[in-house]
């Protein structure tokens, strides 16, 4: 399958409002949220983007959809550079690429009913007559498990359960039949049993509708279940990318190893050898020189702080940004 | 929940509204009653405006109503004034003036202040800064002084008085709506609207505005209360309205002269009415505020 | 690990209601359990099951209109619910402590770390000299793995993980018997969470602590808890050792919960899901509250409520699959 979406050397800095002194210095402090990230997504695959807070994963997701403008770098959709698109073409792109947010309750307008919220994308892109739109919406609602659709059509977000709201958000994202869906921590706010239902739903929908997902998460256990390939991010950079089996059985980068070891396992007999990295995630405003992870890495050597380690291939489809072996 | 989307039929709309009433009644205590009390007062005065004949058979300008400076009696509920006019009749007909001016002024303020607030908050940048500066300057003027200044500038007449009062409240709507817009702008559902491809006008009208409107309705009611007082004050000091139109403020000013001689009814009744009407709108506003934006006690 | 030590907390038939506009929410209904000295008990369940409400009530921290309407909470034989305000205040933070999910809102933004500790110590033990208090604080910081220099910092200058450590430090500075932790790691990153879990295990040994861990995170509870109580719809559905609960779950809800959580060490092809949603606590279903969603439901389940009975050694569940129903 071909490449659906590609990110090339994406950089996103959020400038900080400086103090008086900054006016005299040569550069302004900024949060380096995304630091030259490159990714590709093949059509039909689920790419997991895993990391902790400050890793830049959410920002990357938004850059891929041009919900944020990159400071530099570009994003390509089906080979076309979307970073420079005009308003009309951007609107067309928006019907092909969508996002599901973390908190369903804040991503739905409290004053729009379920039906109105899901229908709106169709209205924006002028798809179908009012009757056709309604039929389409009801059909999709049933498909995502919002049943009975006629009844829930008139409900408002505050009248729905968490699981139902998230389904509404998913339906709204899929109503224009996009190819590409960015899911930004879609399970984070959901209850344990609801998470499983939504995961199952996402898998099902992917099959039925031929979707490609970028699945952003901090939970590697969930990523293992849903994703084909996984990219691990740390402080704005990708540190490792590998197919699922590879990543979990032969992780290479020390951060990936630490992350995997730290995931809580729902089994009291499980083997737990943590070997946690010392210290905490540094500030994204003044990241450490060279490899971002070296101050916390148990294997760090002097060379690690000299230059940014490139992502090098260490196996089929497996790259890692660590100079050690 | 906000006022639900009404079906576009009067019967449907009425059923909807009644349903909303009974549902909110069960949920809220004191505030609901306050809101209802306010509504009753307003309804009473509005009926007075629309059907004055139901309340009095006298003409407010009739200077032969029956004797000069007569105290309240069964014939003249509120007595007569120094020109032998029936005070109650003047109160009844005066309701039109004051209510009309206050509501019209509030409407004008809202129609100007709300869109400006939305645009300013949403657009940001230099436009927002300039507009905010202007609005803040107007706002910092004591309301009454500003109204007086405009009324004096514009001259007498009902329309001019309405405009004078309206100007005072534009910044109130502007600031409120702008503040709300600024915070709603950051909400995830606005980002979600952008993500589905909505353009800015659509985002403003379908996502931002409906979420701002609840507070505006409350302010509108409180605004009318304030406008009533301002209008009364303006006509009290003699600005704006020609003599032929019955007006509570003017009657207040006339009645003042006779108070020392013990003739209290000329000033008291118009004064009471002003207070009552303003109170009615305030209660409606306060009650509505609680009802439309319930505290998160439950859930 | 638990039957030989004495029981320091005994909750009997606790019932908590709170009235709302459309009725009364039966948040906790007839819950009973014990906590032995030095034991870690996990209270597991999803949102709305009543675990947090239960946790708050253990220190009488429940906000009105919520009220305990029945039962008792016996701490070393004394009913907490019957204590007067003064005794209650003396007990909180000293005999029983509690930490919450969001440390930022639990800490005073105007106090330095040092002041937090000194104030807490002084409140409970006014006679202790400042020198001794500082020494105790220093010792606690060392155990927490926090540098001395942090003493002069304010909460907003610290990371989330560090704040949570401070919280635990404050909770344990007076060496209480019991620590109640309500979703302590939910707001933390994975690696920080792992560090915190290690710290908790360590502190437990050093301070000989009993812990009640309230969480929906099965991984966390598997790592820390000796015994686990599974709650659903305001009631305890199953209670037993951590081993038993995970390896031999009795109640279908427990089974369902375990089945639907992804396990990173396993190769799971499918997650078994539990459709449906939690019961309406204002008018809960007749009989077992899980019946509407239970894959093994029987006619008796919707007629009568099963009791929490010991169907295996030290392992109880409230389910008609095990209880005789004639």
Image (cartoon, coloured by chain):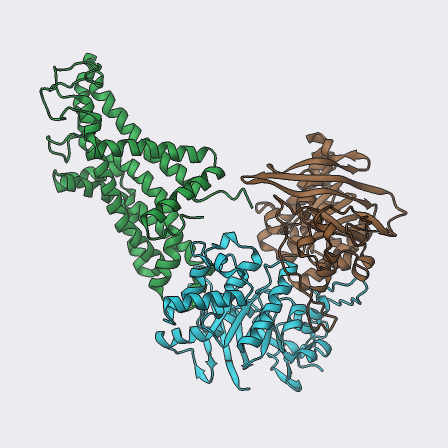
Say which colour chain C has.
brown
Say which colour chain B has.
green
Q: Position of residue B152 (x, y in %)?
A: 14, 38
Say which colour chain A has.
cyan
Q: Nearer the viewer, residue A249 or C31?
A: C31
Q: Position of residue C44 (x, y in %)?
A: 72, 53
Q: How many marks?
A: 0
In the orientation shown, which residue stands out farthest toward the top?
B262
Tell me if I can see residue C248 in this picture: yes
In the figure, is residue C277 to the left or right of A135?
Answer: right
Q: Nearer the viewer, residue C243 or A164?
A: A164
What residue is at 81 percent from the left and 64 percent from the top?
A269
Q: Nearer the viewer, residue C145 or A42?
A: A42
When the figure is inspected, residue A248 is found, relative to residue A100, above or below; the finding is below
What residue is at 64 percent from the left and 66 percent from the top?
A219
In the figure, is residue C101 to the left or right of C200?
Answer: left
Q: Position of residue B75 (x, y in %)?
A: 19, 16
When the figure is inspected, residue B288 is found, relative to residue C292, above or below; the finding is above
In the figure, is residue A263 to the left or right of B141?
Answer: right
Q: Nearer the viewer, residue B145 or C313?
A: C313
When the figure is inspected, residue C97 is found, relative to residue A202, above or below; the finding is above
When the figure is inspected, residue A169 is found, relative to residue C36, above or below; the finding is below
What residue is at 14 percent from the left and 26 percent from the top?
B60
Q: Position of residue C221 (x, y in %)?
A: 74, 57
Asked where in the image residue C124 lies, by quadrant, the reply is top right
Tell me if I can see residue B176 in this picture: no
């Amino acid at each position: 399958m071909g490449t659906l979406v590609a990110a090339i050397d994406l950089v996103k800095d959020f400038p900080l409002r400086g103090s008086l002194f900054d006016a005299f210095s040569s550069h302004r402090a900024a949060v380096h949220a995304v630091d030259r990230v490159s990714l590709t997504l093949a059509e039909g695959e689920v790419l997991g983007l895993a990391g902790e807070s400050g890793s830049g994963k959410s920002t990357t997701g938004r850059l891929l959809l041009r919900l944020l403008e990159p400071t530099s770098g570009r994003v390509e959709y089906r080979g076309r550079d979307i970073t420079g698109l005009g308003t009309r073409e951007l609107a067309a792109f928006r019907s092909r690429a969508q996002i599901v947010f973390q908190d369903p309750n804040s991503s739905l307008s409290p004053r729009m009913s379920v039906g109105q919220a899901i229908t709106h994308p169709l209205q924006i892109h002028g798809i179908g007559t009012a009757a056709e739109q309604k039929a389409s919406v009801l059909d999709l609602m049933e498909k995502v498990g919002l049943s009975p659709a006629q009844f829930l059509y008139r409900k408002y977000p505050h009248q729905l359960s968490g699981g139902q709201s998230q389904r509404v958000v998913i339906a709204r994202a899929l109503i224009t039949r996009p190819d590409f869906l960015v899911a930004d921590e879609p399970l984070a706010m959901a209850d344990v049993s609801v998470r499983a239902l939504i995961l199952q739903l996402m898998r099902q929908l992917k099959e039925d509708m031929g979707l490609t997902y970028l699945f952003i998460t901090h939970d590697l256990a969930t990523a293992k279940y849903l994703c084909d390939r996984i990219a691990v991010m740390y402080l704005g950079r990708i540190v490792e990318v590998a197919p699922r089996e590879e990543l979990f059985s032969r992780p290479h980068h020390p951060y990936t190893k630490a992350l995997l070891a730290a995931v809580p396992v729902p089994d009291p007999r499980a083997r737990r050898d943590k070997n946690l990295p010392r210290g905490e995630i540094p500030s994204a405003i003044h990241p450490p020189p060279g490899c971002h992870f070296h101050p916390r890495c148990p294997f760090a050597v002097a060379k690690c702080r000299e230059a940014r380690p490139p992502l090098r291939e260490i196996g089929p489809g497996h790259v890692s940004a660590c100079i050690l072996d | 929940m906000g006022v639900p989307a009404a079906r576009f039929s009067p019967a449907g709309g009425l059923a909807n509204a009644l349903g909303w009433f009974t549902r909110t009644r069960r949920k809220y205590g004191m505030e609901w009653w306050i809101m209802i009390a306010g509504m009753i007062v307003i309804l009473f005065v509005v009926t007075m405006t629309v059907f004055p004949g139901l309340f009095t058979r006298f003409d407010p300008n009739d200077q032969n109503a029956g004797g000069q400076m007569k105290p309240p009696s069964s014939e003249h509920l509120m007595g007569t004034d120094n020109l032998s006019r029936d005070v109650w009749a003047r109160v009844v007909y005066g309701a039109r003036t004051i209510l009309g001016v206050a509501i019209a002024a509030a409407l004008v303020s809202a129609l100007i202040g709300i869109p400006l607030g939305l645009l300013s908050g949403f657009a940001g940048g230099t436009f927002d800064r300039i507009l905010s500066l202007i609005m803040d300057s107007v706002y910092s003027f004591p309301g009454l002084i500003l109204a007086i200044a405009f009324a004096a500038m514009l001259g007498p007449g009902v329309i001019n008085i309405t405009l004078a009062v309206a100007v005072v409240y534009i910044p109130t709507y502007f600031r409120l709506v702008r503040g709300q817009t600024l915070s709603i702008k950051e909400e995830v559902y606005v980002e979600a609207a952008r993500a589905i491809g909505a353009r800015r006008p659509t985002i403003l009208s379908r996502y931002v505005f409906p979420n701002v409107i609840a507070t505006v309705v409350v302010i509108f009611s409180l605004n009318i209360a304030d406008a009533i007082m301002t209008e009364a004050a303006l006509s009290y000091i003699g600005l704006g309205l020609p003599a032929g139109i019955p007006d509570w403020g003017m009657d207040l000013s006339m009645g003042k002269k006779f108070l020392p001689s013990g003739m209290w009814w000329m000033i008291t009744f118009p004064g009471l009415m002003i207070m009552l009407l303003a109170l009615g709108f305030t209660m409606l506003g306060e009650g509505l505020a609680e009802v439309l934006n319930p505290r998160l006690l439950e859930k | 690990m638990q039957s030989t030590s004495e029981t320091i907390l005994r909750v009997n038939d606790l019932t908590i209601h709170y009235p709302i506009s459309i009725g009364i929410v039966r948040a906790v209904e007839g819950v009973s359990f014990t906590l032995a000295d030095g034991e870690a008990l996990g209270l597991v369940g999803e949102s709305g099951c009543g675990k947090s409400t239960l946790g708050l009530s253990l220190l009488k921290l429940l906000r009105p209109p919520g009220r305990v309407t029945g039962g008792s909470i016996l701490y070393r034989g004394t009913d907490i619910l019957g204590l007067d305000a003064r005794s209650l205040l003396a007990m909180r933070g000293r005999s029983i402590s509690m930490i919450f999910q969001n440390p930022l809102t639990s800490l005073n933004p105007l106090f330095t770390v040092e002041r937090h500790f000194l104030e807490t110590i002084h409140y409970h033990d006014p006679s202790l000299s400042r020198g001794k208090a500082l020494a105790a604080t220093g010792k606690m910081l060392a155990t927490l793995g926090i540098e001395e220099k942090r003493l002069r910092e304010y909460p907003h200058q610290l990371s989330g993980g560090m704040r949570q450590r401070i919280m635990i430090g404050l909770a344990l500075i007076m060496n209480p018997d019991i620590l109640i932790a309500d979703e302590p790691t939910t707001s933390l990153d994975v690696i920080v969470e792992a560090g915190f879990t290690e710290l908790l295990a360590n502190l437990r040994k050093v301070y000989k602590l009993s812990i009640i861990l309230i969480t929906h995170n099965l991984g966390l509870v598997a790592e820390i808890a000796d015994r686990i109580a599974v709650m659903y719809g305001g009631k305890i559905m199953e209670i037993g050792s951590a081993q038993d609960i995970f390896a031999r779950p009795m109640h279908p809800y427990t089974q369902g919960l375990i089945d639907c959580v992804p396990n990173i060490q396993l190769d799971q092809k499918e997650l078994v899901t539990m459709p449906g949603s939690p019961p309406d606590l204002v008018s809960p279903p007749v009989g077992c509250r899980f019946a509407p969603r239970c894959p093994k439901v029987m006619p008796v389940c919707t007629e009568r409520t099963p009791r929490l009975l010991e169907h295996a050694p030290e392992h109880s569940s409230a389910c008609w699959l095990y209880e005789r129903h004639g």
